[in-house]
Image (cartoon, rainbow, N blue to C red):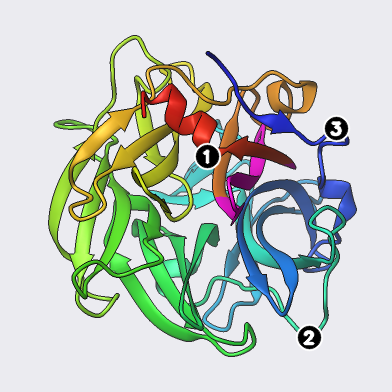
Amino acid sequence: MRDIATRYKENPLLSPKDLNASDESMIIECLLNPGVFKFKGKTWLLVRVAERTLQKEDVLSVPIYNEDGKVKILNFDPKDSKLDASDSRVINYDGVDYLTTISHLRLLCSDDGINFYENDEYPSLFGEGEYESYGIEDCRVSQIEDTYYLTYTMVSSNGVGVGLRITKDWKKFEKKGMIFSPHNKDCAIFEEKIDDKYYALHRPSSPELGGNYIWLAESFDGVHWGNHKCIAKTRKGKFDSKRLGAGAAPIKTDKGWLEIYHGATEKHRYCLGAILLDLEDPSIVIARSEEPIMEPQEAFELTGFFGEVIFTNGHLVKGDQIQMYYGAADEFVGLATFSIKQILKTLGQ
């Protein structure tokens, strides 16, 4: 059985035109997969907003964040021999790469889980400091008791790593810095300790030996991680043949920890699958999707900033139902629901 998602009929929920740019010198290029959580009785999204600079004639401009999280514009002469602007996503000047867009995380809330709006009491999150100078991306939100753990991608000229910020009120944040060094991303912390230890899924990458696989790590404090184990690899000829990575925090079921993950092919087509992990030892994989449980099929999933992409790192669970918010075509945010029982059935459970 392929694609068991029930999509909201009025998708997409959010498009770039629905939000204002963070700075007068910027324009929103796309919205991407949000982190999701409940707070004060409302549904909240932490949407990745990718922006680019407004370009002026005879100047090539790219944005970065300074130490205080403010946009700084770098201007280059297009005729400068040190400049390589052949890639629309990344330029290189004198041996240093710069992104043409940078991302921040925008907080939106909703009373019904469908209509979202910004609340001025809860500001956006921006990259700060050397290791976030090219932005912060793809945040997962895990709640353990009354504390929210935000794991997100830190981007800079030094590489791509996993950052951690902790909050209880979404106004004050305790910054823990980089908890997984480059190249690493797709980190989701379990929302319950096992044998008094934190667990997290993450995705280190190897361009030569190895690949883009899902790993499991343990921690006694949620900050320092070890005992890393590779638990899921790419599979030739399947929907996850080139890379895979965790979505949101795993869901605890009576059959095991259920993780919805993304998988991509060599042609960069992104679908969703599921992995079931042992409750007591989540390094043990009980079952894994042979086919995707959700794949690009709607117009806004097939065509956009980068088409044929479905990517999620946020959901809410209500009984048997997973209410999943996802990025589509690297431009829009959509809503779909799943039955946990139905997903487990596809896994033979």
Report the amino acid beneath label 2: Glu
Structural crowding at the residue carrying mark 3, measured as other residues with C-alpha within 10 Å and reported as few (<14), some (14–19) or many (≥20): few
Badge 3 marks a residue whose secondary structure is loop
Left or right, residue 155 beside residue 3: left
Residue drawn at (56%, 43%) of the image: 312
Tell me residue 291's x, y (percent).
44, 17
> Marks 3 and 2: which is nearer the front?
3
The answer to whether the residue labelled 3 contacts the one labelled 2, judged by CB atoms less than 8 Å apart, is: no
> Marks 2 and 1: which is nearer the front?
1
Answer whether residue 328 is magenta in the image.
Answer: yes
Tell me residue 64's x, y (percent).
58, 64
Badge 1 marks a residue whose secondary structure is helix
> Marks 1 and 3: which is nearer the front?
1
Task: State how far apart marks 2 and 1 are (Cα).
Answer: 35 Å
Residue drawn at (76%, 46%) of the image: 58
Q: Earlier in the sequence, mark 1 or mark 3?
A: 3
Q: Earlier in the sequence, mark 2 or mark 1?
A: 2
Vertical relation: 106 (above or below) 248: below
Task: State how far apart marks 1 and 3 are (Cα).
Answer: 21 Å
Left or right, residue 280 beside residue 166: left
Q: Which mark is residue 9?
A: 3
- Which residue bears the numbered disc 1? 340
Q: Earlier in the sequence, mark 3 or mark 2?
A: 3
Residue drawn at (44%, 56%) of the image: 249
- Which residue bears the numbered disc 2? 121
